[in-house]
Amino acid sequence: MNRFAFFVPVIAFFALALMLWQGLYLDTKALPSMLIDKPMPEFALTTVDGDEVTNADLPDQAFLLNIWGSYCLPCLIEHPTFMRLAEEGEIPVVGVNYRDRQNLALNWLDDNGNPFEFSILDESGRFGIDLGVYGAPETYLVDGDGVIRYRHVSVLDESVWREEFMPAIAELRSGVSQ
Amino acid sequence: MRHFYTSICLVFILLTLGNSNIAIAQVDTFKFDTPEQQQRFRKLSDELRCPMCQNTNLSGSTGGVAEDLRREIHRMIVEGLTDADIEKFMFDRYGDFIFYKPRFRAETAFLWFAPILFLLLGFAAGYMVWRKSKLSAHQSASLDVGQLNRLNDLLDSKQ
């Protein structure tokens, strides 16, 4: 009993130390999304090309929803990854042009290439609020039923694609085939 | 020379004081129907946290999303929504993070009760230590006859 009582503070110390040590490696910038396993918010907007677009126009298979803007430098960094995904037909990518201007968005797509099925124009950022967006770039994985499954905040490069998105997509697709 | 340094210091102090008078809040040009609505807007945008620039509230942030959220708060207040409605709107989209003071729910219960829990644990530990020291002090003062005899025998045998 005495022995046990002696070890209680020691164990408590190590438990606390372990917890705080892990805290050092927490990414406090990446907030959990409230929309995981919830359907995409309803929208009726236009694309950057001026076409009307609603939830019904979204792909009926799993797709990526990428929040981007012409002002956003990290978006330029992740852009080659989306270009490759689109070219190789790995997964459809839908864009949300967030807090931008239509002409700037169109110029950006002209200059850098357009990997998106279409880009939803969200000049006011109002649709971004419904998604819980807090800054470009963010990328959501949405399943074929229009349910949000995953969110990645900041740059989605090849290693993020391999380590986070590929397993999540594989899981989704295996679920569909069953 | 000393006068020079003194005056430099004074200038800095005055500058700092001057700065503290500059309003920290972003200037809002929103129109409200009543002063009470304006008060509610102030209170909400002071209490809600900017999700992008994490250590400022909505009223103090220049971030794009903070600007949008202030506009949404204004819209909802003018449309007649209650503070609870507006807080729910924010929670549904940004989660507990949006509140500087997390709301009490099952998930946040530990956060709220942990200080009391640790205080009680501290009292319990203190009480146990106190009781033990009292007990051992009491014990050492009174060896019974058998123990005394054994002690004497041990001391005798050593000699």
Image (cartoon, grey):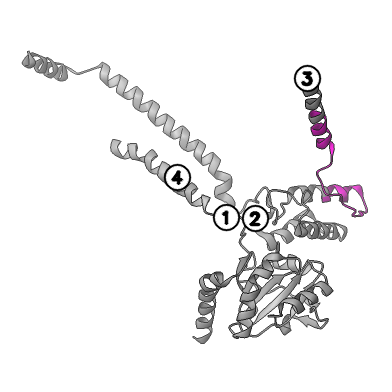
For mark 3, what is the residue? Answer: B1
Classify mark 1: helix, strand or loop: helix
User: Badges 1 and 2: C-beta atoms under 8 Å apart?
Assistant: yes
Look at the image and tell me in which quarter the N terminus of chain A lies: top left
Which residue range is magenta in the image? B13-41
4 or 3: mark nearer the eye: 3
> In the image, is A9 to the left or to the right of B25?
left
For mark 1, what is the residue? Answer: B107
Quadrant in which residue B155 is drawn? top left
Please, is residue B145 above or below residue A116 in the view?
above
| Alpha carbon separation for disc pair 3 and 2 | 56 Å
| Alpha carbon separation for disc pair 1 and 2 | 10 Å
2 or 4: mark nearer the eye: 4
> In the image, is B117 to the left or to the right of B143?
right
Tags 4 and 3 on a common chain: no
> In the image, is B6 to the left or to the right of B134?
right
What amino acid is labelled 4 in the image? Answer: Ala
Q: Residue at the far front: name it.
A: B1
Foreground pick, A82 / B119: A82
Q: Residues within 10 Å of mark 4 (few under 14, many from 20)?
A: few
Q: Earlier in the sequence, mark 1 or mark 3?
A: 3
What amino acid is labelled 2 in the image? Answer: Asp
Residue B25: in magenta span:
yes
For mark 2, what is the residue? Answer: B96
